[in-house]
Image: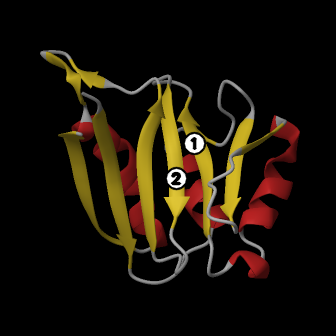
Amino acid sequence: MSRTADIDLVFAHAVTVDAVVRALAGAGWSMHEPLGISYMVNDDGLFDWQSASTDRAADVLAMVDAPGTIGHQVGVCVYHTTAETGGQLLFHADRSHCSFIPTIDRRTLAGAPALTDMAWYLNALVPPLLAVGLAGYEARDSAD
């Protein structure tokens, strides 16, 4: 049995990946993860993640926010260096919905290590995203 954990984020208006990444940067998040930078543009239904060196962050943001990506899902990985955890930010085609999936050293609950510490992720993600129009969220951790 596997587990799925994610947080669906809803914004009051369409957002850019750059605006979300900048808002999270003020709370300790970065696109610089242990393996560099990971991103994807889903223009063919394959969710083909790519990697880039950390000095290409501006290029990656320009690529995922380019006009040609509107209508396609795009994603970047974000990492919280101090907490040593992170995950994927997947932006839906309309850019007013985004999902965070804790895929990099997922934080777990001390008394229930199979479960994700969703409270930690919510406290680390929600406050900074209010500045870019976060209107609500739904968090899930479930067995598949």
Q: Which mark is residue 126?
A: none
Task: Kindly tell me whether residue 40 is visible in this rendering.
Answer: yes
Frontmost residue, 87 versus 18: 87
The residue under the point 66% across, 24% down is 34
Judge from the rendering whether residue 61 lies leftward or rightward of residue 70; answer left or right: right
Q: In which quarter of the image is the N terminus?
A: top left
- The quadrant in which residue 68 appears is bottom right
Up the image or down, 129 lies above or below 87; here it is: below
* Disc 2 residue crowd, few under 14, some 14–19, many 20+, Cα 10 Å: many
Up the image or down, 88 lies above or below 75; here it is: above
Mark 1, secondary structure of its residue = strand
Q: Name the residue under label 1.
A: 78
Picture mark count: 2
* Disc 1 residue crowd, few under 14, some 14–19, many 20+, Cα 10 Å: many
Q: Quadrant of the C terminus?
A: top left
Q: Report if the CB atoms under discs 2 and 1 are less than 8 Å apart.
A: yes
Q: Name the residue under label 2.
A: 89
Mark 2, secondary structure of its residue = strand
Q: Position of residue 142 (x, y in %)?
A: 20, 41
The residue under the point 51% across, 24% down is 82
Amino acid type of the residue that numbered disc 2 sits on in the rendered structure: Leu
Task: Kindly tell me whether residue 26 is visible in this rendering.
Answer: no
Amino acid type of the residue that numbered disc 1 sits on in the rendered structure: Val
The span from disc 2 to disc 1 (Cα, nearest Å) is 7 Å
Judge from the rendering whether residue 15 lies leftward or rightward of residue 105; answer left or right: right
